Each structure stands twice: as structure tokens, then as C-alpha cells.
Amino acid sequence: MSAPIIAQQFWIQSPGHGEIMSAALNPPQAGDVLVEARYSGISRGTESLVFRGEVPSSQYSQMRAPFQEGEFPGPVKYGYASVGDVTDGPAAWRGRTVFCLFPHQARYWVPLAAVTPVPADVPAGRAVLAANMETAVNVAWDARPVVGDRIGVIGAGVVGLLVAWLFRQMAGVDLMVVDVNPARAAVAESLGLRCRTAPPVDTEADLVVHASGHPEGLVTALGVAGVEATIVEASWYGTREVPLPLGEQFHARRLTLRSSQVGRVPTTRTPRWTHGRRLALALDLLRAPELDVLVSGESHFAELPTLMASLSRAPGDTLCHRIRYA
């Protein structure tokens, strides 16, 4: 009988406190693959809320990650952006680079169906953006832009910029990105986008996507929406309350406020699309080299406890922070 495989894993032991633990992996099941992680990505907004213990108790079930262990608020092992190489399992898969919705962990056994091949021309370090791109695709599906739309994207984080990058490729679209952080302008420009710190006062958008993660951004989104426009809310607030000025132009302009959540494929797509097909599309879209600009930092796995504590308090200009395992 072979010795158990020991793997280092990142656990949130209690709100605001994380540790790297070593534990033996459960024996594999038939058809499982062993993945040696190369990189993982920090989903800054959601993971910061989880790290701070701000998941509402009513959402404990809905917020479970695919391979989460433990329970909110902790101890819990959480995350969903891992890229690695298959080192054991079916012969046809050994040596392949794959993406998996797995927490921050150095190696792990998972069912073959849980991994998605990374295209040969997508670097492993860029593939950590797959979960963010999948979210952006879902937002675009929920938003339903059409040719010629005047579109505002409020919030130039990773998801907001990816959504805007997808919209930019539609014919005739007049696109504006807004973020209060002036440092976002250079990042947006490298993606072919224009970004400003505030919208023009006379903006009347056909469609607005809010992805800043701050209630003030949603207020801005309501203010730039034109008559009969739709605002798609892509941010998630955890336990925070979000006051909105619905007594102003909301009713007079007959605005529609629609939520978007990556856990559900929109009903207009469910007859044809699965989560797996959507994730494969997200990885295919990551062939574009200009998207490397969205990875704004990298740290070794050993630094993750300190890093998560820092990012959850003051993220600064961080976009996607990549974790390296080699």
C-alpha cells in the first residue's frame, strides 16, 4: 500500500486569520486525476469577504465553493482559481495543464470531469483569470447588449474590465468605464478602453453594469442610466447594507435593476449551455495576450496568510494577485 500524499493547504481558521496546513489527501477514486498546482488566483472581492467572515448565514449554502472544506465563517478552505499539471490519473491526461475550481492548495485529487484543459496558447499564469472571465461572460449574457448601445461599466476591477473588454468587441458600441481610482486608466487603455474617474453629467446610457463592489458605485450606475435602461448588478456585498436613492429618477425613468451571479447560467442559455461549456469558453477567450495586464502581482504560496490579511484590509491598486507554487 502506497504512502498517503501530503499536501499544503490554505485554511481560514477564523475571520481575519489564515494558515497554511499540511494534510494527507484522501485516496483517489476511479478516474480521478492528481493535479500539481502551478498557480492560483485570488478572487479579491469574494475571497476578502470570506476572509473577513462577512458571508451572511443565510447564504452559507449558496456561497459554497465546489471543493470547499469546512464551514463559514471558519475554519474553511475556500477558493476557485487553480491551474496546474496532471501528474497521475488516466494516461491520456498526464502532463496536461488544466484549470480547476479548487481552493489554494499545492496538490489535489479531483474527478476528471472537474478539470478543464488549458489551451496550448494560453500561459498557465494567465489561465488563473478563467473564473473571472467566466463571471464576465455570465454578466454579458445577463446584460444582453445590442449593436449601437451606449454602455457604462462602473468599476474597473478585474471583472469590470473583462466585461468592458467583451463589450468593446461589439459593433457600434459607445463604451465608457468609470472608476474613482485614477490608476485604473492606464490598465483600461492597454485593453483598448477609456476610463474616467466620474461620468459626464449628461450621460444617458442604454445599459449599465456595476462591478465596483461599493454601494456608492451602484448609486453612480443609477445616475447614468437613461430612460427604460437596465442596470446589471455584478457586485456582491456580503453582510453590508446597500442604501439606494430609489426616490429620485428610478421610477420616473422606469429603470430595471437586474442581478447577475455566476453560480447560475441564465435561463436563456440553460437549454444549450452547461457550466463546463461556459468555463471552456472563458479559457478560450484568455488567448488574448493583452489580458496579462490584469495580473497585477505575484507571491509565493507561503506568503498567502499574510497577503490575504493585507488585501482584505487595504487592497490598494491590486487587480488579480497570483499565487505561485513552484
Image (tube, grey):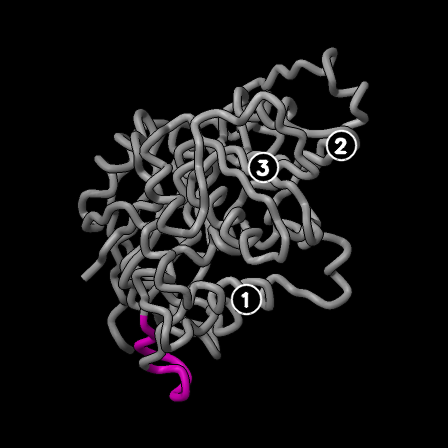
| Amino acid at the residue labelled 2 | Thr
Residue named by callout 1:
281
Q: CA distance from mark 2 to mark 3?
A: 15 Å
Image-based side of 242 in relation to 158, left or right = right
> Along the horizontal axis of the image, is 129 left or right of 136?
left
Q: Mark 1 and mark 2: span between their CA atoms?
A: 28 Å
Q: Which mark is residue 241?
A: none
In-front residue for pair 206/70: 206
Report the residue at 37% width, 37% height from top: 185
- The mark nearer the N terminus, 1 or 3, is 3
In the rendered image, the vertical position of residue 81 relative to residue 111, given as above or below:
above
Q: Which numbered disc, 2 or 3, marks the residue that appears first in the sequence? A: 3
Q: Name which residue type carries label 3.
A: Gly
Q: Amino acid at mark 1?
A: Leu
Q: Residue 305 location in percent, x, y?
A: 24, 38
Q: If the image is split into quadrants, where does the C terminus sit?
A: bottom left
Q: Nearer the viewer, residue 221 or 196?
A: 196
Residue 130 included in the magenta stretch of the image? no
In the displayed structure, does residue 173 sit left or right of residue 50?
right
Q: In the image as oriented, which residue stretches furthest toward the top?
A: 247
User: Which is in the foreground here, disc 1 or disc 2?
Assistant: 2
Local SS, label 3: strand
Question: Range of the magenta residues?
Answer: 85-94
Q: Earlier in the sequence, mark 1 or mark 2?
A: 2
The numbered mark at residue 256 is 2
Image quadrant for the N terminus? Answer: bottom left
Circle 3 sits on which residue? 152
Mark 1–mark 3 CB contact (< 8 Å): no
